[in-house]
Amino acid sequence: MLPAFSAIYYLLDAERPVNVWHRLDSDDTHVLIDGGPVEYVLLHDDRAPARVVLGRDLAAGQTPVLTAPGGSWKALRLLDPDGFALMATVVTPAWTPEGVRIGLDPDAAARWTGAAPWLTAAVIDRLGRP
């Protein structure tokens, strides 16, 4: 029986500033615990591409929590190259090895390039490298 959820935490820092393109079958909630801000790019077939900043400055439109629906591609990037971000993620239902894909394939990258003015080939490439 599959657990209802799984949770992990990880650190983005100068040595690993990017959480590369990945796709989960399950919903994926990211929580900024400390540090930041973090750029979060979300690609979902049913929606326009989204770029959200995970951070603590709510007045500037940042948010400390974001849920990516299952089936969406996402990548995160630390905005301050000298900073850090301690992140947690809760996956519902639980993560399984069969339910994840790492790395945006070339066809998907070509399809999404230019889908928004800010979603350039350079942005897609930058979020594909740790």
Image (spheres, rainbow, N blue to C red):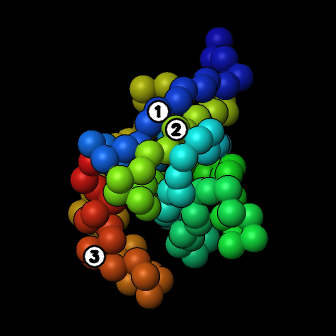
Q: CA distance from mark 2 to mark 3?
A: 28 Å
The residue depicted at 67 percent of the width and 25 percent of the height is: 5
Eye-nearest disc, 2 or 3: 2
Foreground of the two, 46 or 53: 53
Whether 117 is drawn above or below 39: the answer is below
The residue depicted at 71 percent of the width and 23 percent of the height is: 4
Indicate which disc, 2 or 3, sits on the residue closer to the N terminus.
Answer: 2
Where disc 2 sits, the SS reads: strand
Residue 8 falls in image quadrant = top right
Name the residue carrying label 2: 86
Where disc 1 sits, the SS reads: strand
Name the residue carrying label 3: 121
Q: Which mark is residue 10?
A: 1
Amino acid type of the residue tagged 2 in the rendering = Leu
Q: Residue 12 appears at what percent x and percent y?
A: 41, 43
Indicate which disc, 1 or 3, sits on the residue closer to the N terminus.
Answer: 1
Side of 103 relative to 75 (left or right) = left
Q: Residues within 10 Å of mark 3 (few under 14, many from 20)?
A: few
Q: CA distance from mark 1 to mark 3?
A: 27 Å
Amino acid type of the residue tagged 3 in the rendering = Ala
The residue depicted at 28 percent of the width and 56 percent of the height is: 128
Where disc 3 sits, the SS reads: helix
Amino acid type of the residue tagged 1 in the rendering = Tyr
> Are the residues flagged by discs 1 and 3 in contact, CB closer than 8 Å?
no
Side of 22 relative to 30 (left or right) = left
Residue 120 falls in image quadrant = bottom left
The residue depicted at 63 percent of the width and 17 percent of the height is: 2
Whether 3 is drawn above or below 69: the answer is above
